[in-house]
Amino acid sequence: MPGETSEPVGIAILAKAPLPGLVKTRLVPLLGPQGAARLQRALVVRTVETACRAGTGPVTLWTGLDPDHEVFTALASQFDLRLARQHDGDLGARMLAAIAAGPTLVIGNDCPPLTPHHLREAAAALRDDNDAVIIPAEDGGYVLIGLRQPQPALFCAMRWSVPTVLAETRRRMAQCGLRARELAALWDVDVPEDLGRLLQPGFEDLLATLGAHLINRNAGAFESRFAFSHSG
């Protein structure tokens, strides 16, 4: 059957354990430490489900903060994936380590609209003689980067979590002479202004984890922030 002999493209998920006060800290003013941790947990679960459903190749969950957290071990028992501890160093060092073994797509757990189709499309781009593939984030970063082989120049001495990450990555790809494909941009959940997007259909599972009382208390804020983020 078509696709049976397709080259495997691994998926590496970088995720932090859902520890209150240590994850999604920019959302704490709106959700509180416990609410932010619950959202992190739900995002990790959703991302693992998406990656495993994509079926592009082996899935590795690179764990951080508390590598032995029960959410990670539970996912490993439920899904066909491997657990690995994130390497020391900044985000670039951790991503680079995750690409050490052949064609790989690297993602975080902050992009709820990412679907199996996006991952299959990115994997197909690597199989189609591209050295790299990227899915931009609307905030100026990216939600996925895929490489056929490690490219240290894309990750070393990079300033992360700023709106120039994507532009700088494009510049470095060109400088390295990489053939790259860029897919349509997606959004991620980093700041309070992003939370209103979860009111759209398809993200009910994430809203449910926050609890009805929290949603009702913050509904106005969610809606106003969502409107603000889509204005102008």
Image: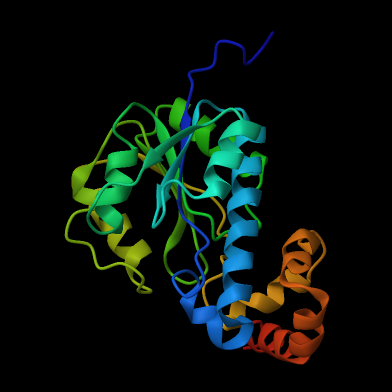
For the N terminus, which image quadrant?
top right
Is 132 or 48 nearer to us in this picture? 48
* Residue 211 percent coordinates (x, y): 77, 73
Is 172 in front, or is 52?
52
Residue 68 rendering spot, x and y as whole percentages? 44, 46
158 in relation to 231, above or below: above
Inspect this view and state whether residue 60 appears: yes
Q: Quadrant of residue 98?
A: top left
**In the rendering, at what x and y percent does residue 155 appear?**
24, 53
Relative placement, left or right, of 166 versus 19 is left
The residue drawn where x is 82% and y is 64% is: 201
> Height in image: 140 above or below 152?
below
Q: Residue furthest top?
A: 1
Q: What residue is at 59 percent from the left and 82 percent from the top? A: 32
Residue 119 visible to the viewer: no
Image point 62% across, 16% down: which residue? Answer: 3
Question: Foreground: 37 or 207?
Answer: 37
Q: Of 69 and 105, which appears nearest the observer?
A: 69
**Residue 228 as seen in the image, left or right of residue 168:** right
